């Protein structure tokens, strides 16, 4: 078991914060987080590109090249692998592993199950040590299948979700990810059914981190939340200054930000 995989089997779930550039990743690592993920939305927005449109392959690889040699474990959000060709996705995974990434997040976008399963299998064949977190978007892009599946798994877990997760596990996924799923009963029931760790996207309106831990969730991602809150903090700062108020909240000093640089210089 790789060190990154082991973080999914510890006494507490892996809390995975998501960064969008070197500084954001470095400041998270400085706080003691052993692993950092990237956020596809943050990477795309920072480059002025659309998220989820396979438009940021180069930007994603460039960031992985920057972060892969840093003293923390790096997992990369690769959307759907930036291709529908499993061989092309596998090649991208090889490139990620070569620059130091230890995990990859692959989303199905509600596309054909067989295609996503083939991508997972190809990635595991090309980069066996890369932790593949297989994401299904049944709750993120779909209706969430709130009627349940009728086979005793629990209200809120539908047939399509289970079919997709079963296929992804069989294809070799090391973990599965169901963003948008927040119902505690459904989460707990899904944990009982799965053979691999369950990853849940934290939601301010959903279960807390300790509650997710009690349900058996093994990985909790923050996704684009830190990036979106950073933009919100920027707007609050500008507004406060414009209104004659002093900005509130934590503010790193100039020297502290400079120290986050790879060589300690501006």
Image (tube, grey):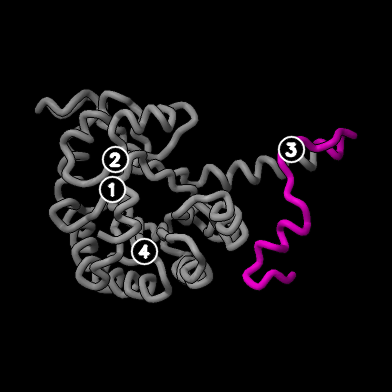
- The image quadrant where one finds the N terminus is bottom left
Front position in the image: 2 or 119: 2
**Are the two marked residues, 1 and 2, in contact with CB atoms closer than 8 angstroms?**
yes
Q: Which residue is mark 3?
A: 236
Residue at point 36%, 31% (across, down)? 212
Query: Which label sits in the foreground, 1 or 4?
Result: 4
Image: 163 above or below 93: above
| Element assignment for label 3 | helix
Kindly report the distance in space between the C-alpha atoms of the residues bearing marks 3 and 2. 34 Å
- Mark 4 or mark 3, which has the lower sequence index? 4
Bounds of the magenta span? 240-266
- Position of residue 59 measured from the top left corner of the image (x, y, whole percent): 51, 68
Q: Which residue is mark 4?
A: 102
Query: Which label sits in the foreground, 4 or 3?
Result: 4
Based on the displayed image, in which of its 4 quarters is residue 121 positioned?
bottom left
Q: Which residue is mark 1?
A: 110
Kindly report the distance in space between the C-alpha atoms of the residues bearing marks 4 and 3. 36 Å
- Mark 1 or mark 3, which has the lower sequence index? 1
Front position in the image: 224 or 70: 70
Q: Which residue is mark 2?
A: 138
- The image quadrant where one finds the C terminus is bottom right
């Amino acid at each position: 078991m790789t060190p990154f995989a082991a973080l999914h089997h510890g006494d507490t779930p892996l809390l995975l914060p998501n960064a969008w550039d070197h500084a954001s990743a470095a400041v998270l690592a400085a706080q003691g987080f052993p692993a950092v993920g990237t956020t596809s939305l943050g990477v795309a927005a920072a480059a002025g590109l659309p998220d989820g449109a396979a438009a940021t392959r180069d930007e994603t690889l460039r960031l992985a090249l920057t972060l892969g040699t840093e003293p923390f474990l790096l997992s990369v959000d690769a959307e759907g692998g930036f291709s529908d060709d499993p061989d092309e996705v596998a090649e991208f995974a090889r490139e990620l592993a070569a620059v130091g990434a230890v995990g990859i997040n692959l989303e199905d976008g509600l596309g054909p199950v067989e295609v996503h399963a083939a991508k997972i299998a190809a990635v595991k064949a090309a980069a066996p040590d890369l932790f593949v977190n297989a994401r299904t978007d049944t709750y993120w892009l779909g209706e969430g299948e709130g009627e349940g599946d009728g086979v005793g798994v629990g209200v809120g877990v539908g047939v399509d979700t289970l079919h997709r997760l079963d296929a992804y596990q069989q294809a070799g996924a090391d973990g599965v990810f169901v963003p948008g799923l927040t119902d505690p009963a459904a989460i707990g029931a899904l944990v009982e059914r799965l053979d691999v760790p369950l990853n849940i996207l934290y939601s301010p309106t959903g279960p807390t981190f300790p509650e997710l831990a009690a349900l058996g969730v093994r990985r909790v991602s923050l996704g684009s939340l830190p990036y979106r809150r950073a933009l919100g903090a920027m707007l609050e700062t500008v507004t406060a200054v414009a209104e004659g108020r002093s900005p509130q909240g934590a503010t790193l000093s100039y020297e502290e930000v400079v120290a986050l640089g790879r060589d300690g210089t501006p």
